[in-house]
Image (tube, coloured by chain):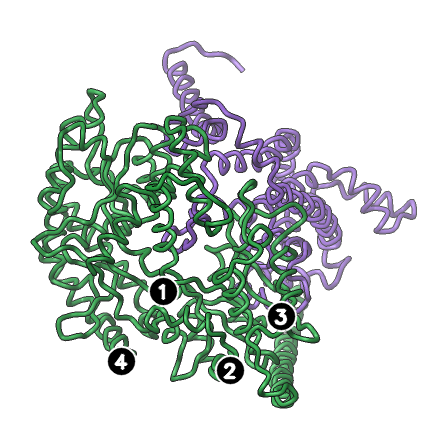
């Protein structure tokens, strides 16, 4: 009896579940059939709206009247600060957008950098995206394929301002091309500088001087210096507790600079002699540096524990004064080297060009200039708003920097207001002119001057002068910042000095041949291939496998989708 | 119990004690390490010169987080979540477990309901459907998205149900004879008797509500709606430096001392509450299992 009742209720349960499922499916198809009609009505509204606006009256910075409300999805920084009473939902920059452009921004979601991408994926998968949002290259392509975003070609041509257009084109058209799918523009690229991937060799100058060594010009000298740093007690503490070259298990920046010295460009796309785009990690140039690293590992000249140390751990070795050399970009002192000075005011870090394996100077790699794309939801009534927002940003924060005290940053509290801005492309060369100004002022012994300097230059120069006045007081955070500014923006032998006066001046640069942020096969296969690559490199360095496994890797790479990726990359050129 | 003095027994006591002390230290030392980091100077912390004792003692990190609205905001969201979550969860579990603790003869659809709950234990919709459900209920970005989806846990119902079954039937029967209804029996007789069980469930929910972070990341759209653990997750994951493209932003990245100070403060509430609830906890879970 009880058993039968149980059976009955199971059947009943199944019936209910099926019913519930059918109902939910029905309501889903309802909502689906409802949404196209909604977007249809929106798109039928649109021609009327554009007609009513006089076509001759196209002002790139024209204020929306009546004001419009835009729901956006944006990323935020974990370490952003806000003035009291302000938040990412309500702040002076958003107020400025409303008063100056007639655009009221409402954050539908605002998520911190690292989690932003997964949030966007969830939102895309759920089918309802905000009016505007920031996406990456792969997401842009997925959205276009799903037909969820608006074609911006015509509004871009119509509304873009001179300044914005100039800035977006300044990188040779890479950024705009990478936001274009099948000849149509689907996103406004957030341009950034390509030289963040340009590697330099950072050396403890005081160690070099202690041992009476010269900065290395060739890779052989590099290894000799690394050896001396490991064995000859460069910090004079009578302990063998130092090593030559900083590396981490991620096989990222510090490694890449080392490989670049051998004219190998792992993880990057380069142009081969026939003008074809090829993947750096599978080129024969990789062999020599790999072989050498395996040798160095055996001799204990690189950190024997690098295989288990992540970037944070590597920074620890730098901070505690255990490492004498590291490859990094021009901003390396700000993020990583600063703590080395904090722990030891006598630590001197100087930037040098990468050494070279032969007579040919090593070239710095200039990477992608688009860090993200602002897309507009299909059917949104004011697609031109995204272009106007970009114009407004360029006009008020890049070209003129009006009212910086109010909308830029607060030098006293260190709160940066400009970071709240959206659709915010930056000039591809931003830091170079800033560096030239800072250097000129330093050489002329000028103090920072608010009336003369741009806000950034003022901040750098002011910090450097504070540091120069009291250079041994390395416990004071503002002096630490000044030290870092001096190493990146100052002189002599600062990061930007090498970048500007060596790499760019002599044209020792290599630009990316990529015209797209991602291709379909790249989006699908690249993570697996990258893992394979990392394993191969690690195994060769640790001596588990010989150099033959590199050839094996190259053929595997091609077989497992690499061939197709190369093909796709070249078809987009 | 007779104390035996022979060598074998003493040796095994010694071994057991040392293993227990080692295990205890394994749990304690990470706490001390985090505390020492949070009380050291940033330079010493970044260079990893800190062990179990602060180096270059400084309270700056704590001063900084006290003045950091994001931290206190997240703390407040978590407190709300725990308060609402625990109350709701305990109440709903109580209401669900009571009828299910009756025999099928007294409560005919019992088998159906039990199956109904068991199915939810075995099958779930997955991440995206769950997100869509939360969104269509309009719960996104509200505290309810954090408490409602986990308010009724089948495991806790089972625990409570077995606890109720362990109570003497005679109590209930005599109450019936005296004219009490089910509500009276539940709240006047069962509730006071099942405090250990409730404390167990309360503690479980408290810990899980306080510690869960992924739902905050998924359902909350604004950083200042994040509960504490979600906020901590965003600060302890290292920012990908290759993607930071603003020089002055790089400088604002918070130091290790600030991170560890926040982690330590976030651990405190549970550390304080746990010892007080633990005596119930041990009793409650054993009672439920043995008599059920």
Q: Quadrant of residue A28?
A: bottom right
What is the display colour for chain B? Answer: purple
Disc assigned to residue A369: 1
Q: Pointer 4: what residue?
A: A571
The answer for how far apart the CA atoms under marks 1 and 3 are is: 27 Å
In front of the other: label 4 or label 3? 3
Residue A170 lies in quadrant: bottom left
- Crowd class of label 4 (few under 14; some 14 to 19; many from 20; radius 10 Å): few
Inter-mark Cα distance, 4 to 1: 20 Å
Q: Which chain is green?
A: A
Q: Which percent across, then down, holds residue A106? A: 64, 64
- Can see residue A314? yes
For residue A412, above or below residue B125: above
Q: Mark 2 points at which residue?
A: A158
- Of badges 1 and 2, the one in the foreground is 2
Which structural element holds mark 3?
A: strand
Mark before the other along the chain sequence, 3 or 2? 3
Task: Give coordinates of residue A126: x percent, y percent.
Answer: 55, 71
Nearer to us: label 3 or label 2: 2
Do callouts 4 and 2 point to residues on the same chain? Answer: yes
Q: Quadrant of the N terminus of chain A?
A: bottom right
Dots 3 and 2: beta carbons under 8 Å? Answer: no
């Amino acid at each position: 009896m009880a058993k039968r009742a149980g059976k009955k209720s199971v059947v009943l349960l199944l019936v209910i579940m099926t019913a519930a499922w059918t109902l939910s499916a029905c309501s889903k198809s309802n909502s689906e059939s409802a949404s196209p009609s909604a977007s249809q009505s929106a798109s039928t509204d649109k021609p009327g709206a554009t007609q009513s606006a006089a076509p001759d009256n196209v002002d790139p910075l024209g204020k929306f009247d009546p004001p419009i409300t835009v729901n956006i999805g944006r990323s935020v920084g974990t370490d952003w600060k806000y003035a009291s009473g302000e938040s990412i939902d309500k702040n002076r920059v958003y107020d400025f957008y409303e008063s100056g452009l007639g655009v009221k921004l409402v954050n539908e979601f605002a998520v911190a950098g690292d989690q932003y991408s997964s949030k966007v994926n969830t939102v895309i998968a759920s089918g309802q995206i905000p009016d505007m949002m920031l996406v990456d290259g792969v997401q842009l392509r997925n959205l276009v394929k799903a037909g969820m975003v608006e074609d911006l070609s015509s509004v871009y041509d119509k509304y873009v301002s001179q300044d914005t257009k100039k800035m977006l084109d300044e990188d040779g058209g890479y950024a705009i091309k990478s936001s274009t799918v099948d000849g149509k523009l689907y996103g406004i690229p957030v341009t950034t500088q390509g030289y963040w991937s340009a590697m330099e060799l950072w050396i403890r100058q005081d160690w070099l001087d202690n041992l009476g060594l010269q900065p290395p010009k060739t890779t052989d000298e590099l290894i000799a210096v690394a050896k001396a740093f490991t064995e000859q007690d460069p910090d004079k503490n009578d302990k063998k507790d130092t090593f030559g070259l900083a590396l981490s298990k991620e096989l990222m920046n510090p490694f890449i600079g080392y490989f670049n010295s051998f004219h190998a460009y792992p993880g990057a796309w380069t142009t081969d002699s026939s003008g074809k785009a090829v993947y750096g990690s599978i080129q024969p140039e990789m062999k020599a540096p790999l072989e050498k690293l395996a040798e160095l590992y055996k001799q204990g000249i690189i950190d024997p524990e690098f295989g288990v140390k992540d970037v944070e751990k590597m920074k620890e070795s730098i901070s505690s004064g255990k490492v004498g050399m590291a490859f990094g970009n021009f901003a390396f002192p700000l993020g990583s080297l600063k703590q080395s000075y904090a722990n030891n005011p006598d630590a001197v870090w100087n930037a040098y060009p990468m050494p070279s394996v032969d007579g040919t100077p090593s070239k710095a790699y200039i990477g992608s200039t688009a860090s993200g794309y602002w897309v507009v939801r299909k059917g949104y009534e004011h697609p031109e708003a995204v272009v106007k927002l970009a114009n407004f940003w360029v006009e008020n924060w890049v070209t003129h920097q009006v009212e910086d005290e109010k909308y830029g940053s607060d030098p006293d509290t260190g709160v940066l207001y400009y970071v709240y801005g959206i659709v915010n492309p930056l000039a591809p060369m931003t830091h170079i002119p800033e560096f030239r100004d800072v250097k000129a002022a330093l050489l002329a012994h000028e103090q920072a001057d608010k009336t003369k300097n741009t806000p950034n230059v003022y901040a750098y120069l002011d910090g450097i002068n504070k540091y120069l006045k009291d250079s041994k007081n390395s416990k004071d955070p503002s002096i630490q910042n000044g030290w870092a500014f001096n190493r990146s923006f100052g002189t002599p032998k600062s990061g930007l000095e090498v970048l500007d006066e060596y790499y760019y001046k002599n044209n020792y640069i290599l630009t990316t041949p990529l015209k797209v942020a991602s291709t379909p096969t790249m989006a699908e296969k690249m993570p697996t291939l990258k893992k394979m690559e990392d394993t191969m490199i690690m195994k060769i360095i640790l001596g588990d496998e010989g150099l033959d496994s590199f050839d094996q890797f190259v053929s595997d790479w091609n077989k497992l989708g690499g061939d197709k990726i190369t093909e796709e990359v070249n078809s987009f050129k | 119990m007779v104390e035996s003095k022979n060598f074998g027994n003493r040796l095994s006591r010694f071994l057991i004690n040392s293993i227990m002390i080692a295990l205890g230290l394994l749990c304690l030392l990470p706490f001390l390490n985090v505390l020492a980091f949070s009380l050291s100077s940033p330079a010493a912390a970044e260079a990893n010169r800190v062990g179990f004792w602060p180096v270059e003692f400084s309270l700056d990190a704590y001063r900084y987080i006290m003045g950091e609205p994001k931290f206190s905001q997240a703390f407040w969201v978590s407190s709300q979540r725990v308060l609402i979550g625990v109350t709701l969860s305990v109440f709903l579990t109580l209401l669900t477990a009571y009828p299910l603790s009756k025999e099928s003869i007294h409560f005919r659809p019992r088998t159906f309901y039990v199956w109904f709950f068991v199915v939810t234990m075995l099958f779930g919709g997955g991440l995206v459907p769950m997100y869509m459900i939360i969104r269509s209920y309009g719960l996104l970005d509200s505290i309810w998205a954090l408490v409602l989806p986990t308010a009724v846990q089948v495991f806790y119902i089972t625990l409570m149900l077995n606890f109720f079954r362990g109570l003497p039937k005679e109590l209930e029967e005599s109450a019936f004879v005296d004219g009490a209804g089910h509500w009276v029996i539940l709240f006047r007789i069962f509730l006071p008797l099942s405090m250990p069980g409730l404390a167990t469930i309360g503690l479980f929910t408290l810990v899980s509500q306080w510690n869960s972070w992924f739902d905050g990341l998924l359902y909350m759209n604004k950083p200042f709606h994040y509960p504490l653990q979600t906020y901590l997750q965003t600060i302890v994951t290292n920012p990908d430096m290759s993607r930071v493209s603003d020089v002055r932003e790089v400088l604002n990245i918070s130091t290790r001392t600030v991170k560890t100070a926040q982690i330590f403060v976030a651990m405190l509430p549970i550390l304080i509450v746990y010892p007080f609830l633990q005596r119930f906890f041990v009793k409650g879970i054993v009672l439920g299992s043995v008599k059920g």
